[in-house]
Image (spheres, rainbow, N blue to C red):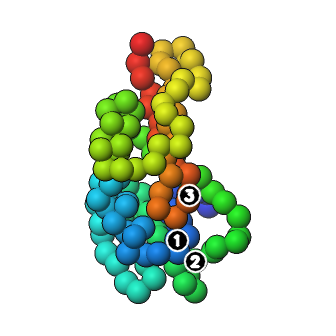
């Protein structure tokens, strides 16, 4: 048996203000809070852990990565996020027409300035 990558276990995002970022991911995006510690917060995102890191555990200045969340209704999610005062950087739009569905993408800014993609694979 050869070793191989077989999935994503955890994604890390560097943040500057842990309480503010924790509140955004928990209260605005609605992710399930797993646990927190000084300079850390962990959320469940459909079986993948989302790790917020600040202080010595963060990678500020080390480059950027993007997270793309999945939703089943990007338009309804946009309305729900706007009702919670989230910043919609770019509203939902079709980015690809696949054989059986359209791929929709919306960009949201978190409280730390990170851009978060939210995608819907909308059946035709």
Q: Is residue 100 above or below residue 58?
A: above
Whether the residues at callouts 2 and 1 have beta carbons within 8 Å, the answer is yes
**Regarding mark 3 in the picture, which secondary structure is present there?**
loop
The nearer-to-camera label among 2 and 3 is 3
Looking at the picture, how far across and down is residue 77, in whole percent?
34, 38
- Please name the residue shown 47% across and 43% down the image: 88
Give the quadrant of the C terminus. top left
Mark 2 nearby-residue class (10 Å; few <14, some 14–19, many ≥20): some
CA gap, disc 2 and disc 3:
14 Å
**Regarding mark 2 in the picture, which secondary structure is present there?**
loop
Whether the residues at callouts 2 and 3 have beta carbons within 8 Å, the answer is no
Looking at the picture, how far across and down is residue 73, in whole percent?
35, 31
The nearer-to-camera label among 2 and 1 is 1
Of residues 50 and 2, which is closer to you in this image?
50
Give the quadrant of the N terminus. bottom right
- Please name the residue shown 59% across and 23% down the image: 96
Which residue does the numbered mark 3 point to in the structure image? 114
- Please name the residue shown 38% across and 75% down the image: 19
Q: What label does residue 15 carry, if any?
A: 1
CA gap, disc 1 and disc 3:
9 Å
> Which mark sits nearer the N-terminus, 2 or 1?
1
Which residue does the numbered mark 2 point to in the structure image? 58
Mark 1 nearby-residue class (10 Å; few <14, some 14–19, many ≥20): many
């Amino acid at each position: 048996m050869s070793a191989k990558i077989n999935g994503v276990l955890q994604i890390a995002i560097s943040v500057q203000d842990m309480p503010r970022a924790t509140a955004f991911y928990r209260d605005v995006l609605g992710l399930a809070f797993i646990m927190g510690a000084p300079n850390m917060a962990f959320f469940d995102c459909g079986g993948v852990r989302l790790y917020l890191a600040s202080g010595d555990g963060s990678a500020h200045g080390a480059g950027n990565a993007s997270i793309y969340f999945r939703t089943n209704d990007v338009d309804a999610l946009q309305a729900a996020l706007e009702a919670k005062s989230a910043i919609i950087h770019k509203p939902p739009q079709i980015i690809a027409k696949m054989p059986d569905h359209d791929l929709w993408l919306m960009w949201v800014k978190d409280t730390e300035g990170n851009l978060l993609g939210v995608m819907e694979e909308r059946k035709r």
